[in-house]
Image: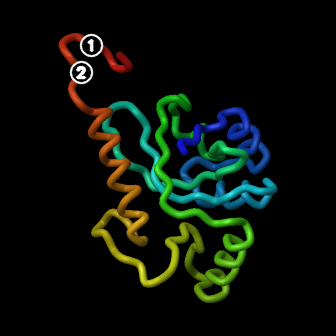
Amino acid sequence: MHLSLDETRSLEIAQQIKSKGGSPFDNAYRAALLLNGAVYVQGFVVAAGTRCQPIEHAWLELDASWIDPTFLSLNRAAKDLYYFPAHKLGIKALKATVEESQEDYPDDDPLPIYGVQPYEYYGDVMLGGKDYLTAYQAAEAKCRELNAPKPNGAKEGE
């Protein structure tokens, strides 16, 4: 099932939590604590345009749509964003994992969360399990598609 970004709810929750650009994991965590029934999602976002590349990101899934409290800082229209989920956590599991990480590693940021250890390391790309690699490869493929040469004289979006 392909979900779409709920731009209105994304902007509303961003205002509520005073979203900070460049902090998608923290923004999604704080938003998840406010929205009953939300699922915290980590993965990659691809923004159509020049120099397309997968960006590690976090957002929420709620009521069959995605809510991205960092959406505004991506500087793209919702139609130009493509999300590739790798890891999902319910609120109870999210809170427990963050609390445990803060207790065990107080000097480290508890987010992002990469699933069950041991993690695999994919070079300079990321940590995470096979689900991360799969999501990253799908995001890379989307970038290749978006960056493919257009037929003679066609403009982007044609």
In front of the other: 58 or 21: 58
**Where is mark 2, residue-wise?**
150
Residue visible at 34% across and 41% down? 142
Residue 105 in the image: above or below residue 130: below
Q: Position of residue 50 (x, y in %)?
A: 33, 32
Name the mark on residue 100: none
Number of residue marks: 2
Q: Residue furthest bottom?
A: 104
Find the residue positioned furthest to the left.
Answer: 152
Residue at mark 1: 154
- Classify residue 32 as left or right of residue 152: right
CA distance separating discs 2 and 1: 6 Å
Q: Residue at x 40, y 33 (%)?
A: 48
Is the residue under label 1 in contact with that under label 2 (CB below 8 Å)?
yes
Residue 55, given in percent of the width and then of the height, sits at 42, 51
Q: Residue at x 59, y 74 (%)?
A: 110
- Toward which corner of the image does residue 103 lie, by quadrant? bottom right
Image height check: is 155 above or below 47?
above
Residue 65: horizontal and vertical position, in percent?
65, 42
Q: Residues within 10 Å of mark 2 (few under 14, many from 20)?
A: few
Tag 2: residue type?
A: Lys
Decide if residue 124 is on the left or right side of residue 95. Answer: left
Q: Quadrant of the C terminus?
A: top left
Secondary structure beneath dot 1 equals loop
